[in-house]
Amino acid sequence: MNLPAHLQTIWQDLGIEPEVLQQKSLCVFDEAEELVDVETTFDGRVWQLTPAAAQAWQAMQAAALTDGIELKIASAYRASSRQVELIQRKLDLGQSINEILQVLAPPGCSEHHTGRALDIYQPGGPVVEEAFETTTAFAWLQQYAKIYGFTLSFPRDNAFAYVYEPWHWCWHPPHP
Ligand SMILES: [Zn+2]
């Protein structure tokens, strides 16, 4: 896969080599076309997903709740432009682009802009930390998430050279 033209300048400005795409076996994901509001945080932020992913999430969330497990959204849809801001902020803090790319996907390569990816937490538990894997929410997700079409994108020792992200789940359309 080659880097699409609209990403070339953005990557160049951030100091990301186009070769990173092959080196990290990254995919360029399409930006969500349609989004619906899913959840509002206590500080008024609205999380959005595509309509199909939202429906699957709500079904999964309700099922977990009947098992006594509360699932909450730490992050959902993020525009590619937001990914640029997140990377730029870390660069401004003096981190190298290589360090940053171990925890953040290059613009265009984050599943969050597909509107199908979610970072999940359990109230009172760790948020976007590896320790999420010790929660009852994670155990529940490991057992049941696939029923709702959600899979763990970055398991331990994943092929993308990303850190292990037990909190990051992505909804995939069912195969016909
Ligand atoms: Zn995530």
Image (cartoon, rainbow, N blue to C red):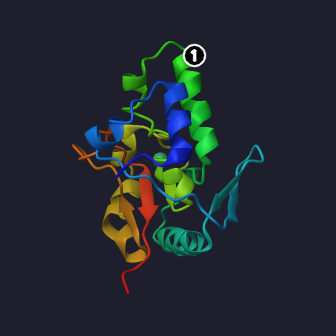
**Residue type pointed to by label 1:** Asp
- Relative depth, front residue between 46 and 3: 3
x then y, percent, for residue 160: 29, 44
- Relative depth, front residue between 42 and 46: 46
Q: Is residue 123 left or right of residue 27?
A: right
Q: Is residue 132 left or right of residue 35?
A: left
Q: Can residue 119 be seen in this view?
A: no
- In the displayed structure, 130 sits above or below 2; it is above
Q: In which quarter of the image is the C terminus?
A: bottom left
- In the displayed structure, 88 sits above or below 169; it is above
- In the displayed structure, 21 sits above or below 140; it is above
- Relative depth, front residue between 11 and 99: 11
> What is the residue that sits farthest to the front in this orientation?
5
Residue at 27% in and 38% down:
23
x then y, percent, for residue 145: 39, 68
Residue at 54% in and 76% down:
59
> Helix or strand or loop: what does disc 1 sit on?
helix
